[in-house]
Every structure is written in structure tokens, then in C-alpha cells.
Amino acid sequence: MPKPETMTTTADRPGTTVADALLADGRIVHLRSAAAADRDELAAMFQTSSADALRLRFFAVPGPAVVATEVARLTRPRSADHAALVAVEVGRIVGVASYECGPDPSAAEFAVFVAEDQRGRGVGTVLLEHLAALAKMNGVSELSGEVLPVNSSMLRVARDMAAHARTDDEAQVVDVDLPTGARAAAISAADQRHRTAERLSLRPLLAPRSVAVVGASRTGGVGHQTLRALAEYGFNGTLFAVNPHADSVAGVPSVKSLRKLPGLVDLAIIAVPAAVVPEALREAGESGVRAAIVLSSGFGEAGEHGQALQAEAVRVAREHSMRLLGPNCLGLLNTDRSVRLNATFAGAPPVPGGLGVASQSGAVGISLLDHLARSGCGVSSFVSLGNKADISGNDLLAYWYDDPATKAVALYLESFGNPRRFARIVRDLSRRKPVLAVKSGRSAAGQRAGASHTAAAAAPDVAVDSLFAQAGVIRCDDLGELIDAARMLVGQPLPAGNRIAVVGNAGGVNVLAVDAAEAVELAVPAVSPELAARLGPAGQNPLDLGAEATPQTLQAALTAFAESGEVDAIVVVAAATRANDVPGMLTAAGEVFDAHPDLPAAGVVVGRWDVSHVAACPERPAYDLPERAIRAIGHAARYAAWLREPLGGPPILDGVDAPAAEAAVAAAGEGWQPADVVADLLRCYGIPQIAQATAISEDAAVAAADELGYPVVVKAAVPDLVHKTDVGAVRLNLTDARAVRQAYQLIATALDTAQPPVLVQPMALGPVELAAGVVHDPLFGSLVMLGLGGVLTDLLDDRVYRLTPMSDRDGRLMWRSLRAARLLTGYRGAPGVDTAAVEELVHRLGRLAADLPQVAELDLNPVVAGPDGLVVVDAKLRLATVGDEPDPYLFRLR
């Protein structure tokens, strides 16, 4: 297949946008190709720089002719061996970076220059990151440059990007080599830089010192209600209304326009008709506003005209280095006592607490806030994302990473902008604090069809499930489950394991809780003799204390369980009757858990569900149904188990010939591939295949069978015939030449072809048939699949997926996640299979998928596995050109 063209879009042409990014101080910089129109400004940037600054770049103070030559080089049209990017902030060029290829097109020399008054803001780092990404797309694998030893800032940039510096005692310069591919050290440093920049960028939005509401009418309307909400919640800053017809609105001082404000404003809330929003944003930017919330609707959700308005709104905001939330959103709130920002037109705000909430839907956001308030679950901040024209969930995850007030994060998502970057950001965040998510779109109507077994099963929701599982995100089926789990995870420790005790005064509810536990992989262990003795005559787990149980009886039982070390969490069941004291029981339970702060617990209150019960034991949530409590504990236990797992690293694989594989793919055409191409590709990655021969006649098929040895299999070798069995194009267990001839004739009849090409293979038998493969998703990247194979693939639908890149722990987790995992370890006397070989197979597929995104579908089915290893019996491969896909490593604004 020919090498794909460089991913050049309109945005990448000389003089147009490449990306918008954040500098170290959180300000927005606009990156684009240098153009002839930039010559004067670039020349002025050099000419106004000091002699010391010029010496660091040119190793001497350049004269006018040298500057003119350099400017001409920078502004010549981009080509395969040359590119130059300029960084523009609020209309001014603040830096430039370029590369030039020499005789070797895979290597290039780079140069960076930043305006002298802009140094120390990360301009050079951002330019070099994007220049390296551009070079990589053009086939350049390494950038190199010479840096003076005194140029400490440039050497620091190179070190942060994991560049290799070479020097010796007599050297006058330092040679810096920068690989354009992603490297672990560079990625880690970049992630830290970007998190810091995001936090500074979003601070004017989430913790402003001053707010102006544009479009706050004197009576009613979204702007008026948002202004009132800000005032009534007690915003700890300066508040203004912007209304040309009023001196005050709802008791808040009003000005005729943002330009009339007495001082700078951090945040502008825009609630005017969509058509005038771009102008309102322009006025805000010119007035020094750092962030804006657009509540107005009528943008991207409203057809082509609205999409154009939204693009214009973003363009204006970016021109003025202003972050934008929305449009078409509910607003945001921050419950921090030092901020007290309720910039929404929702109902009553929730109580302060540790849950950060983001919702793509305003209506869902209202529902979340309402139910969180009623359940007593406190919120640190809430953000309604709306159309996500600029600020997305990725930005908020980076902000919440270092937010001390946010102990857990809850997300309602309808779409992903860059799911590959989301996966990396959320995985890092999940290592610090729990992340819960509801992702809509599970229905079949939203699923993508595919031809092969691997692709057909890998609907978009499968990719989401894989992403969440690998990143430690707690996926919830609905909002109620999300709220229940959040209440369990905010404010109390994680379970040390999956063992629970169920203790209470309602035997039937206890039984329901135990039944629910099995479904979420929680264990209800039998008690030891020592614990049974402490619990008394009815000492067991679950423990029914009887309907008339007193607070003292409950407290004694809970203390016994808590001190036993035999359980990792406790469910307290309290059924209200006229004869007992449920509030007293919960108070008694709270005293036990206060004395054992490392033991998580949840209550189930039956018959008297009200907030007072929650208040009796505020750190441990109470639920009205046992299933809700058990599901919540199950989520907490699985998350804790994920945290205990080592991170893992890249699998170490020998026998991989990536250059040969790239060459084979480049030489092939698009679409389904012939057997020899498939075999060559698998061979490049050390994936074992059964011996086979291609034949195009009866005689050739018999000759191949004689050489391979009977019994054999004869199957059609038609690349685009995906399901051969369905049309009778596979014949098994052929024991002699006559059977081979008959099989060939039957396949010819099935395909209505006189001389069909066929594959002849030895008959392979093993205790287990598996299926494995790769499917590429343009947004999520490549997924690796493992499941039961043969006819069971579709019948039982027992498959697991992992997104690339895979760690060396994913192979083991994949086969152990299969429902039929016991078949692989030996079941009812059958021999087990070589599970190490299974793990190696999926790791090799992961490497193949990561190296070759052109592999749209690779289906290995069946893979015959046994005690001595495995072998691929049938393989199908489809190649496709890779389009413009999200970069998981390069930071850029939406």
C-alpha cells in the first residue's frame, strides 16, 4: 500500500493554523506555518533583540544580510525537506522554529528563536513540540541542532523533551539530538507542563476574582437568573452586570459595556443572542477578560449557520488568549469558601464537598446537582461543558489533577474529542483519585458495523469500555449508579479486598445483599470460630440481629467484625419498626467506624429513608436498597484492586522486524489481502502460523496435501471472502487425495468458479480454539481482541479488548477476563494451554497494531492453543489509508 500522504489539511498550509496551545503561564499561543507576509515582523524580531540573544542563535552577532537570508529561509513555502512554524500571541509573533533536511530525508537540523521579552514562558518548548510532530508526519525521525553551552534555556528545553546532548572537553557547542517519536521521559515531562498550564489557564474561569454578566436583563431571563445566583451564593469577588439600559440589576452595579468597567475582569458570562456572541467576546477580549462562559444556544447544535457562529466565537476567543466554556451550557460553580462561585441558572446549589462534576448535557447536569444535593454528597466544582467548543473534559481532568478540594471526579460524557489523549490524562488522574463516568450511546443504533469477527464486535462502546478498564475509570450504567458510587468513594477509605460483612436487623434484606454481592465479585466469607464466639449464638455472615436489635447489640457485632480483620468492608442493614431506634443504631455504627477509620462501610436503611439518617454517620453513606449499597462497594473494591496492580511497561518482544513489516504494508494495496501478504506480516512479528500452500487446481491441491501430510484442510483463498464456512468454502479432515479432489470441486461449485485459489493446510487440533485480532478506530486508535474461537466466536460472544499501546500486564489480564478462562487452565480433566504463549500472542498483536495503523482489520480465527503453544490456522487482513487522527501525545486546544 502506498505510504499515506502527509496529514496536511487546510489548517496546515503555509500561513494557516497548525494548532492553538497553552504556554507555561496558561496563555494561548497560535501556531501556524510561516509565510511571506511574516517577513517584516520576523526581521524586526531579530533586529530588536540584544547582541547576546542573537549570539545564542547565530553564534555571532549577525549583520543585516545574514538576518535577511534567515528570514527568507524561514518564510519560503513548506516542502518535504523544510518547515517553519511561528508562534503568535494576540496578533504578535513571539517565536519561530524550523527544520531543514539534509541528504538523509529521515534527519533534519532544527533552529528555534524566541522574542527576547517572551523568554521563560515556554514559547520555545511549545514550538519545538509541534515542530517535532510535523517533522515526524513528514518522515523525519530525528531533529538535531547545535547549542552553545551558555544557552541554558535551550538546553533545558531539550532535556525536558528527552533529547540527547553530546559534547566533549574541547567542544565549543553542544550537539542536541531530538527523536521525533514519543519517548516515555519526554511524555512524562510534557504531561506535567501541560497540567500546570491548564491549571493556570482555567483559574480565571473556576476561581475568578471578578465576574461580569453580559446580557443580564432587569427582569427574568438566563442572564438575570445567573446574576442573581452569583449574588445570592455570596461570590467572594467583584460582581458586575452589563446592561446598556440599567445602572443596576438585581442590586448589582451595571455598566453599559465591558469597556466601561472600572478595572480588569477575569470572567465574562455571556447571555445574549447567538448572533451577537462573537462581538461580545471580542469586546471582552479587548477589555482584558481571561475567560468566558457562553450560556446562549444556537451554535454547533443548530446546523451549519450555528456551526459557523461557533467557529467564529472560538476564533475570537483564541485571538485574545481567552478560554471559552460552552456555548449552549448551564454554566459552572465552585463551592470553595474562598471563591463561592455559582455561575449557573440551575436550581439550588449542592453542599460543598469533594466531588468534581462535569456534564456534557445541561439537563443531565441539573439532575446530577439535584440528586447529589438530596443525597448529601458534597461537590467541589461543577462544570457544564455544553458544545465543548474550547474547554473539554480533558482540560478539566488536568485541572482537577492537582486540585486539593476535589477528592473524586464524576463525568457524564456524550462524545470524545481526542479519546487517545483522554485515556492518558484520565489514567494519570485515576492513580490519584477515583474517576466515575456515565458514557451515553450504548445502544445498537450507535454501533459501527464491521465485516470480520474482530471488527463487528468492536463497536464504539467496546472501545469506551476498553479505555475505561485500562485507565481505571469506574464506568456506571446510569446516573443513579454514578451518584451511589460517588457517595461511597468520597470521604472514606478504599476496601483492602473484596470481603464484606452484612450485619443488620432484617434477615430478608441481608439475603438480598448477599445475592447482589456475587454479581459484583464481592465475597461474603464465613466467619472464623474465634469471630463466631464473639458474635454469639447466631454468629455468622450475614448476621441477622433480629427486628428488635438495639444500638448496643449492633455496635457490639460491628466492633467484633471490625476488629477481626476478616472483612474489608461492612454493610449495615437497619429496618425501621415501632420497636427499634434506627437513628440510634446508625449513631452507634458511626462510633464503631470512627474508631476504625480504615474500614469502609455503607448503610441500608429500610422504612425511614431521610437525610437525618445520613447525618447520623456522615462519612459512610446510607442507601434505601441493598443492591445500591452493594454495587457501590463493588465499584470501590474493583477500583482499589486496579490501584494495587503495578502499572506495567512495554512488552519485551524479540524477533520483530518492524521495517520489513512497514515495507510489506507500503507495497500492498488497500482492502483485503492475499494469503502471502498476511503470512509475511505475521512472520515479521513472530506470530506462529500453520504450514500452508496455495493451489489453483485439483492436482496442485493434491500435491500440496501429499507434501504437507494428511489429514489436511482445504479452504478458499479469496481475500475478500471473510466468512468462508458460511458458503461452504472450507473442507476439514481430508484424509486422502480423493477427498482433496472432491473438496476442491465442492469449493469451486460454492464459489461458482472453475479453478478457485485454495489454501491447503495440515489439520490442526488442540484443546482450545481461540480468536485474536486487531481493529483500528479512527478516534480511539487500534484495539487488540482475544476471545473464544471457531464457531463459538459469535455464539458465545466471549471476547475482551485492549487499546494500544498495551502494557506487559495486559496479556494476562485479557485471558483471565474471559468467561471461559477456566478452559485455558484445564477444565474437568482436559489439558490446559500454554497461557504464556497466549499472552505473547496478544502482546505481539499489540506491537503490530501500534506500529501499523494501516491495519484496519486483522482476524486470526481459529488460533489452536495447547499445552505446547499455539498456532494461527486462519488469518484475514484488511489494509486502509490512515487519515487525520488525534495525536495522543501532542498537546493542542480543540
Image (tube, rainbow, N blue to C red):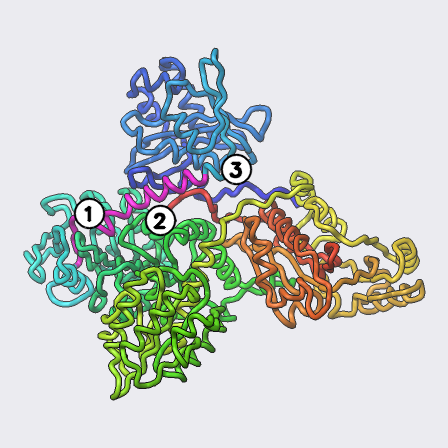
Element class at badge 2: helix
- Residue 543: mark in rendering: none
Picture quarter containing residue 28?
A: top left
Q: Which residue is mark 1?
A: 266
Q: Is residue 216 left or right of residue 800?
A: left
Which residue is tagged 2? 398
Q: CA distance from mark 1 to mark 2?
A: 20 Å
Kind of residue indicated by mark 3: Gly
Instruction: Find the magenta span and give its range.
Output: 187-215
Quadrant in the picture for residue 458: bottom right
Q: Tags 1 and 2 in contact by the CB under 8 Å rule?
A: no
Residue type highlighted by circle 1: Asp
Label 1 SS: loop
Q: Is residue 696 located in the magenta-colored stretch of the structure?
A: no
Q: Earlier in the sequence, mark 1 or mark 2?
A: 1
Lower sequence index among marks 3 and 1 = 3
Task: Identify residue for label 3.
Answer: 181
Front residue (pair 694, 482): 482
**Three-letter code for the amino acid on which mark 2 is drawn:** Ala
Q: CA distance from mark 3 to mark 1?
A: 38 Å
Q: Is residue 725 above or below residue 406?
A: below
Instruction: Please tell me whether mark 3 sits on a helix, a strand or a loop.
Output: loop
Q: Residue drawn at (41%, 32%), measured in percent from left and top?
A: 34
Q: Is residue 215 visible?
A: yes
Q: Nearer the viewer, mark 3 or mark 1?
A: 3
Tell me where residue 13 appears, x and y as whole percent: 45, 39
**Picture coordinates of residue 425 (x, y %)?**
41, 49
Q: Is residue 374 visible?
A: no
Q: Nearer the viewer, residue 370 or 392?
A: 370
| Cα gap from disc 3 to disc 2, whole angstroms | 23 Å
